[in-house]
Structures are given as structure tokens and as C-alpha cells.
Amino acid sequence: MRKTGIDEKGAIKLQDMLEILEKNPRKEEAGAITIFIGRAKKYTRKNEMTEGLELDAYKEKAEETLAIISKELEKKNGITDVIIHHMIGNFKVGEDLVYVIVAGKSRKDTFPVLREAVERYKHEAPIFKRELLKKGKPYWVSEDNKKKREFSGSQHKSDLASNP
């Protein structure tokens, strides 16, 4: 099992991530493990009710980006491990979308790095979110500029990959 990746829905569970931590030769240095679980939520930022999300990615670039983020953050003082796995596919409200785990010497070390890892993957990795509304047309959301963009059919993948 790899430390970072883009996985199809259901391919990885939180327990799998914790098992990765157990294999780290520096695990005994860690006095704190912080975990972020991103989930599909019921309402958009504009308070529109959703049925769920569709997540897609420029997989090769996203995996490369997650690996870079992990390696860079592991170099921070007091950090022993950074694991990031994001899922793609169709998700119902309440289903897990992403797992980010940071292990380190203390909570003072891990909490800021956890937040940085989440903010960085959201802004740097080419992962695309389509909000599936209960009422109204689904739309793709850009994390960088918080604007709605609509795409038809398979056009969105090439457009988003070149203009994330």
C-alpha cells in the first residue's frame, strides 16, 4: 500500500491508512496522530441541498502532487509521517472522500501540518468536484477561485486538466 494516491471509491479505508502508519520505522517517535476525513456534505457553500458529489482527477498529476506535498511536509520539525489518499467516483451525502493523516512528536507539531496538508491538496492537486443538486443543474466547482463552471459530457476532463 502506498502513502499517497488517488483511489476509486471503496478501494481504501481509514484502517488501511492506519496500517501504513504502523509500517513506518519511525512510528515510535510519534506521540500524536491527527486525522482529517473529508466527507460529502448535504449543503453547498450557497446552501443548496445536494444528493452527493462526483469526483474526478487528472490522476497522474494528482498522485504526483500528493506525493510532493507528503514528502515536503514530512521534512518539518517533529513530523514522522504524512499520508494522503483521495477517492474519485460518485458519492452520496455522508460518504468519505479523502483521508489525511499526520503523525509526529506532539499535537503542537501535527495539527498545523494537518491543516497545511488539507489546504495544499485542495489548491494544488488537480481533483475536480461536481455538486449533484437535489434541485437544479449539477455543476463543477473550482477550489482555487470558488467559481462555478459547467461542462458537458466528457469535455470537462480535458478542460479542467488544462485549466484547473
Image (cartoon, rainbow, N blue to C red):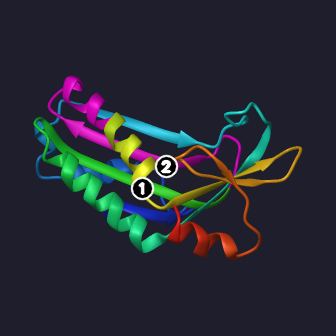
Residue at the image position 45 percent from the left and 48 percent from the top: 122
Q: Nearer the viewer, residue 103 or 129?
A: 129
Residue at the image position 28 percent from the left and 40 percent from the top: 102
Which of the 4 quarters of the picture holds residue 49?
Answer: top right
Q: Nearer the viewer, residue 87 or 33?
A: 87
- For mark 2, does the 10 Å Cα neighbourhood hold few (<14), some (14 to 19), or many (20 or more) residues? many
Vertical relation: 32 (above or below) 75: above
Q: Which residue is mark 1?
A: 85
Q: Amino acid at mark 2?
A: Val
Q: Is residue 105 magenta?
A: yes
SS under mark 2: strand
Q: Is residue 98 left or right of residue 141?
A: left
Q: Position of residue 7 (x, y in %)?
A: 49, 64
Q: Position of residue 96 (x, y in %)?
A: 57, 46
Q: Which region is colored magenta? A: 91-114
SS under mark 1: strand
